Amino acid sequence: MLPPGLVWYVALRDALYLFHMPAFFFVSGIIFSLSAGRPGPSAAALIARRADRLLVPYAIMGMLIFLAKYA
């Protein structure tokens, strides 16, 4: 139940959630294609470098959260 006077919030939230993830994927795809189009490493090398940088902390954080919930 919403407090009185916050009915506008539901409409704003629904409108935002309608497009925010597709817009994120679209913008990140454009940024990736622009960065991969420059002379330098190939797209596969960029993906491997980003995976090393992002997946390791993601996995560690996931394990920490799992262990905290288990304990």
Image (cartoon, rainbow, N blue to C red):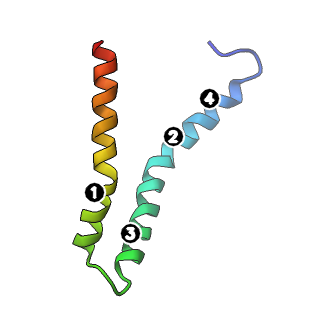
Disc number lying in front (4 or 3): 3
| Residue corresponding to mark 3 | 32
Question: Which circle's residue, 1 or 2, is located before the other in the chain?
Answer: 2
Residue depicted at 75% across the width and 15% down the height = 4
Q: Do the residues labelled 4 and 3 touch (CB within 8 Å)?
A: no
Relative vertical location of residue 44 with respect to residue 68 in this rendering, above or below: below
Q: Which residue is drawn at 37% across and 74% down?
A: 33
Amino acid at the residue labelled 3: Phe
Check contact, mark 1 vs mark 2: CB within 8 A.
no
**Quadrant placement of the N terminus:** top right
Percent position of residue 61, x then y: 34, 35
Q: Which of marks 3 and 2 is nearer the N terminus?
A: 2
Residue 5: name its quadrant. Answer: top right
- Decide if residue 36 is on the left or right side of residue 48: right
- Kindly check if marks 1 and 3 are in contact, taking CB atoms under 8 A apart as contact: no
Q: Nearer the viewer, residue 49 or 13?
A: 49
Judge depth for marks 1 and 4 and give the one in front.
Answer: 1
Q: What SS does tag 1 mark?
A: helix
How far is disc 1 from disc 2 in space, using C-alphas? 27 Å
Q: Check residue 17 in the rendering and tell me which mark sits there, or answer none.
A: 2
The kind of residue tagged 2 is Tyr
Q: Which amino acid does label 1 sit on?
A: Ala
**Residue bearing mark 4:** 10
* Residue underneath mark 1: 51
